[in-house]
Every structure is written in C-alpha cells, then in structure tokens.
Image (cartoon, rainbow, N blue to C red):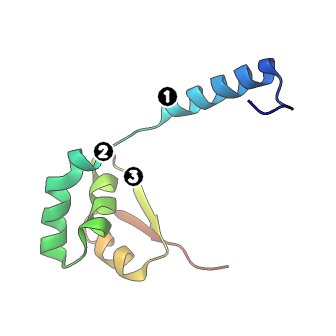
Amino acid sequence: MHKDLKPEDADTAIQDLLEIYDKLNIVTTRELAEKAVGIALTQGITVYDALYIAATQEIDATLYTADQKLHVTASKSTKSKLLKPS
C-alpha cells in the first residue's frame, strides 16, 4: 500500500472499482472466436478486427473506431461510428 494512502481511502477506492466492474459487460474472445473467424473470412479482414465487430454484435452496441477500413466493414453488419481527429 502506498504510504500516503489511508486504509479508509483504500476501502472506498476498492468499493468504487468493484461497483464499476459489476456493471461491465465482459465478453470473452472464446465466446466470439467462431463468429469472428466467420466475419474475418467473409469480409477479408483480420480476426483481430473481426473480434471487435463480433463483440459489438453480441452486446448490441456501437463500435467506435478511428480505423476507416474497420468502420466501413463494420457498418455493413452493425452500428459503427468513425472517430475523426480533432
């Protein structure tokens, strides 16, 4: 424990982190592997990129990416938003 961190502050921080963690929707690569490989093969992209599309489809979310190619591909099958530099 850091010397400046008081035990009561550490307890509060841990509780806050656990509350955030409990609200996360965690999807494992294992759950998405088959679907991602299918997307990769049909769309001509890497499995790595296809995992993002598969995850977005799985949880019915929007994929935010700065990758133009990934955005174009993802837009064919899910919600995707292209992030542009400011």
Res 8 quadrant in image = top right
Q: Position of residue 29 (x, y in %)?
A: 27, 50
Q: Position of residue 52 (x, y in %)?
A: 34, 61
Q: Is residue 62 left or right of residue 5?
A: left
Q: Earlier in the sequence, mark 3 or mark 1?
A: 1
Q: In 3D space, how far apart are the residues under numbered discs 1 and 2 (Cα atoms)?
A: 16 Å
Determine the residue positioned at 26% across, 57% down. Answer: 54
When the figure is inspected, residue 44 is found, relative to residue 75, above or below; the finding is below
Label 2: few (<14), some or many (≥20) within 10 Å?
few
Res 56 quadrant in image = bottom left
Q: Nearer the viewer, mark 3 or mark 1?
A: 1
**Mark 3 residue element:** loop
Determine the residue positioned at 33% across, 46% down. Answer: 59
Q: Nearer the viewer, residue 52 or 15?
A: 15
Q: Position of residue 77 (x, y in %)?
A: 25, 65
**Mark 1 residue element:** helix
Q: Is residue 26 left or right of residue 20?
A: left
Residue bearing mark 3 = 61
For residue 22, which numbered disc appears in the image?
1
Q: Nearer the viewer, mark 2 or mark 3?
A: 2
Q: In 3D space, how far apart are the residues under numbered discs 2 and 3 (Cα atoms)?
A: 15 Å
Name the kind of residue labelled 3 in the image: Ala
Q: Is residue 84 left or right of residue 73?
A: right
Q: Earlier in the sequence, mark 2 or mark 3?
A: 2
Q: Nearer the viewer, mark 1 or mark 2?
A: 2
Residue bearing mark 2 = 28
Name the kind of residue labelled 2 in the image: Thr
